[in-house]
Image: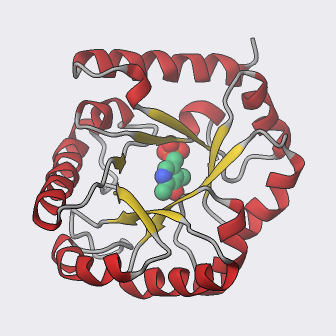
């Protein structure tokens, strides 16, 4: 077995164990293998081991790599999206996790109208209030929902967060719980469905699963360090 195949198997085992602890079915959680900075040959090893869904952070890098990988691979965009990259990003990614402002949402909606696209997106929330982070504050998100729902091209499927870096994985738990609570509140207050919660990275994905993640974004635990 390649190193990537055995890392993937280990991540799948940890996901299943976390799901079991939370009384969830393993198939409620989708593993997005974050392949940023890794070359197509390494990603192809993951494909050989059965992983078909990948996440990339930069549009420019994704545009070069994706055509070098088999057509059955699927790709998500996870990084901050610059407005001048939207036109390239929409055809590449089947889900964009990182819609981090109302302005960006409006611009994606405008370009999607041009392209005849109906992009699936998640709204990125800065739940910790950390100054350096992209994302809606919970308050800004609540006051933006009415306008977001008017952006008729966007299929808004849920929320995403990146908690602050911390030495202890357990520190992420309250941030994940806050994202879930915010999602529950928005669903109630606006009568909308936001089924997806994208949360959990290599250091804390089992905790994210315990707190309700439906998409985990795992890079270095699969591909090694960057
Ligand atoms: C790089 C990245 C990840 C993966 O991080 P790892 O710690 O390598 O698992 C997940 N989400 C986002 C938004 C990233 O930029």
Pick whichever, 226 or 155, lies toward us. Answer: 155
Residue located 41% across and 32% down the image: 29
Pick whichever, 86 or 169, lies toward us. Answer: 86
Pick whichever, 167 or 189, lies toward us. Answer: 189
Residue 168 falls in which quadrant of the image? top left
Residue located 52% across and 87% down the image: 107
Pick whichever, 125 or 132, lies toward us. Answer: 125
Count of numbered badges drawn on the protein: 0
Residue 153 image offset from top left, x and y in percent: 50, 75
Q: Is residue 171 above or below residue 185?
A: above
Residue 41 image offset from top left, x and y in percent: 85, 38
Residue 118 image offset from top left, x and y in percent: 56, 68
Q: Is residue 146 above or below residue 174?
A: below
Residue 71 falls in which quadrant of the image? top right
Residue pushed farthest right? Answer: 68
Q: Is residue 102 above or below residue 54?
A: below
Q: Can you say which quadrant of the picture contains the N terminus?
A: top right
User: Is 146 on the left-hand or right-hand side of 97?
Assistant: left
User: Is 138 on the left-hand or right-hand side of 207?
Assistant: left
Residue 34 falls in which quadrant of the image? top right
Residue 216 image offset from top left, x and y in percent: 44, 40
Residue located 47% across and 71% down the image: 154
Q: Is residue 209 above or below residue 55?
A: above
Residue located 58% across and 85% down the image: 83
């Amino acid at each position: 077995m390649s190193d990537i195949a055995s890392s993937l198997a280990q991540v799948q085992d940890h996901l299943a164990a976390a799901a079991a602890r939370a009384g969830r079915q393993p198939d409620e959680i989708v593993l997005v293998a974050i392949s940023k900075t890794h070359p197509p040959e390494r990603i192809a090893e993951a494909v050989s081991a059965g992983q078909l869904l990948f996440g990339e952070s930069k549009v420019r890098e994704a545009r070069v790599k994706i055509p070098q990988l088999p057509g059955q691979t699927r790709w998500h965009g996870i990084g901050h999206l610059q407005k001048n990259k939207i036109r390239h990003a929409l055809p590449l990614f089947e889900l964009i996790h990182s819609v981090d402002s109302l302005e960006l949402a409006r611009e994606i909606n405008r370009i999607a109208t041009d392209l005849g696209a109906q992009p699936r997106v998640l709204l990125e929330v800065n739940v910790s209030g950390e100054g350096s982070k992209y994302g809606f504050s919970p308050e800004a998100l609540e006051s933006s929902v009415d306008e977001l729902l008017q952006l008729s091209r966007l299929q808004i499927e849920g929320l995403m967060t990146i908690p602050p870096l911390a030495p202890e994985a357990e520190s992420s738990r309250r941030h994940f719980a806050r994202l879930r609570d915010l999602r529950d509140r928005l669903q109630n207050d606006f009568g909308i469905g936001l089924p997806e919660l994208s949360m959990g990275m290599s250091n804390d994905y089992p905790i994210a699963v315990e707190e309700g993640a439906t998409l985990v974004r795992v890079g270095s635990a699969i591909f090694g360090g960057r």
